Image (cartoon, rainbow, N blue to C red):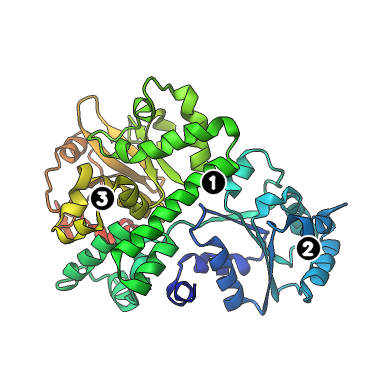
């Protein structure tokens, strides 16, 4: 664990600091799948930006139940926690962390009273399946809490873990003629496709530099998610969730990656499995992107909720679940092209989740066979984003889209170098520079 804490730098720390300094700060709920580092980042944030941390883990239900009995007075709760933790909890100086808070619904309810009566106390909540609990009707005060989302480590954070901050700064300052750095960044990207961004997997890589040790960690992570299905999902859903989860590598290995219920189980119908998909989505373990027939703003208004793709939360877990050997990293660009470029599309999907102000979970298909992998919108414009595995750039679908809709900017992402073409209306953005997309659009 010491290795993990020594290398891990998460960009969400900046958002947490902005939350701390807000004049209208409310209690914070940090959402995210299990094992993405929620507890670690809250404790690290507390150490860096507060004088003290009061950490409360609600898996110890029996000890803590009496604290949240009665009228849920914030002053009473603080007094009882101070006695229980043998520490003075001071407004502004102490970060209070409620972990596994879904285990104590009354603690979630108490956030309303902290927001209304004692906003000076800084409270952050996390929980392994908090998204599921909130959508199942656990009482929490709408409008009385702030939200942030933590995902697996992005490629940029993966570079930070390799002590490449100087290279990142060089790129973010606007340099795109990367020369010798292109080979280095491609090598890092290959490693990221194998290792992914789950903190435990990255920590194991930093510790051992052995892909097979990483593979062991990933298998255990996949198993822990599968165990969660039995432990936390409604009994009638467990089997269906397992079928959906196990089908995802097969779904993404198809040429047309649209989610097919028939691949979950023969004869399966949408109405039987929609609840299972919703549970996995609420748990943060899958990402859905929706088909859009007309690429116009807002994209949500034109999306077809019945036509969608399903991605996992992490490219490394997808590689592990697909059974692709880490040895694929040695074979040129094979890793990017493997099973119809599924790893590449998975990587692009999860990188796009970083841009909170962009709408990214959409794709476009025509009545013919043309398809654009992703549509990106800033609320004013819609930009097609076509991802290509390796160095091939046969982009007939993108040409078809451009001829029909004449977007102000079209984006191709592959292993080819950065380039602006066609009077700057066509952008070749290397896969390893996707984290700069916001700047490119800006």
Q: Which mark is residue 324?
A: 3
Distance Cα–Cα, label 1 vs label 2: 35 Å
Distance Cα–Cα, label 2 vs label 3: 52 Å
Q: Which mark is residue 118?
A: 2
User: Residue 116's quadrant in the figure?
Assistant: bottom right
Residue 62: horizontal and vertical position, in percent? Answer: 78, 56
Neighbours of disc 2 within 10 Å: few (<14), some (14-19), many (20+): some
* Secondary structure found at label 3: loop
Q: Is residue 37 above or below residue 242?
A: below
Q: Nearer the viewer, mark 2 or mark 3?
A: 3
Counting residues from the start of the chain, the first of labels 1 and 3 encountered is 1
Q: Which residue is mark 1?
A: 228
Instruction: Please tell me which residue is depicted at 41% across the width and 52% down the height of the picture.
Output: 353
Relative to 86, 397 lies left or right:
left
Residue 10: horizontal and vertical position, in percent? Answer: 46, 68
Regarding residue 289, the answer to whether it shows in the image is no
Residue 115: horizontal and vertical position, in percent? Answer: 74, 57
Relative to 187, 44 lies left or right:
right
Q: Is residue 9 above or below residue 286?
A: below
Distance Cα–Cα, label 1 vs label 3: 24 Å
Q: Does the residue at mark 2 contact the one at mark 3 (Cβ under 8 Å)? A: no
Q: Is residue 207 above or below residue 415?
A: below
Counting residues from the start of the chain, the first of labels 2 and 3 encountered is 2
* Secondary structure found at label 1: helix
Regarding residue 314, the answer to whether it shows in the image is yes
Q: Nearer the viewer, mark 1 or mark 2?
A: 1
Residue 240: horizontal and vertical position, in percent? Answer: 48, 31
Which is nearer the eye, 27 or 438? 27
**In the picture, which quadrant includes the C terminus?**
bottom left
Instruction: Please tell me which residue is depicted at 38% across the width and 52% down the height of the picture.
Output: 314
């Amino acid at each position: 664990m010491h290795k993990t804490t020594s290398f891990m730098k998460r960009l969400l720390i900046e958002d947490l600091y902005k939350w701390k300094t807000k004049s209208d700060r409310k209690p914070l709920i940090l959402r995210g799948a299990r094992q993405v580092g929620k507890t670690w980042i809250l404790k690290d944030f507390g150490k860096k930006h507060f004088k003290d941390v009061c950490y409360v883990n609600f898996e110890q239900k029996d000890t803590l139940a009496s604290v949240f009995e009665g009228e849920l007075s914030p002053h009473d709760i603080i007094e009882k926690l101070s006695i229980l933790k043998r520490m003075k909890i001071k407004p502004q100086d102490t970060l209070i962390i409620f972990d596994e808070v879904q285990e104590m619904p009354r603690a979630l309810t108490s956030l309303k009273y902290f927001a209304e009566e004692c906003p000076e106390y800084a409270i952050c909540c996390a929980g392994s399946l908090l998204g599921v609990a909130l959508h199942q009707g656990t009482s929490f005060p709408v409008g009385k809490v702030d939200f942030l989302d933590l995902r697996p480590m992005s490629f940029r954070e993966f570079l930070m873990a390799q002590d490449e901050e100087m290279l990142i700064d060089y790129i973010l300052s606007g340099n795109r003629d990367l020369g010798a750095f292109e080979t280095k960044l491609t090598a890092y990207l290959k490693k990221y496709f194998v290792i992914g961004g789950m903190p435990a997997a990255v920590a194991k890589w930093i510790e051992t530099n052995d892909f097979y040790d990483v593979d062991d960690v990933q298998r255990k992570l996949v198993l822990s998610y599968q165990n969660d299905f039995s432990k936390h999902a409604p009994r009638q859903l467990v089997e269906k969730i397992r079928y959906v989860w196990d089908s995802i590598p097969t779904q993404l290995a198809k040429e047309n990656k649209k989610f097919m219920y028939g691949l979950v189980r023969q004869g399966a119908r949408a109405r039987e499995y929609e609840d299972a998909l919703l549970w996995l989505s609420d748990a943060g373990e899958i990402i859905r992107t929706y088909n859009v027939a007309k690429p116009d703003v807002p994209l949500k208004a034109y999306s077809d909720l019945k036509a969608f793709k399903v991605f996992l939360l992490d490219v490394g877990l997808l590689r592990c679940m697909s059974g692709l050997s880490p040895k694929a990293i040695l074979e040129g660009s094979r890793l990017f092209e493997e099973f119809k470029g599924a790893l590449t599309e998975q990587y692009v999907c999860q990188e796009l989740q970083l841009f909170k102000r962009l709408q990214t979970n959409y794709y476009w298909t025509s009545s013919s066979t043309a398809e654009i992998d992703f549509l990106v919108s800033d609320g004013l414009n819609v930009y097609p984003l076509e991802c290509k595995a390796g160095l091939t750039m046969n982009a007939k679908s993108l040409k078809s889209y451009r001829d029909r809709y004449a977007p102000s900017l079209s984006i191709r992402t592959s292993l080819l170098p950065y380039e602006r073409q066609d009077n700057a209306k066509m952008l070749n953005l290397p896969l390893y520079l996707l984290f700069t997309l916001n700047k490119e659009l800006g």
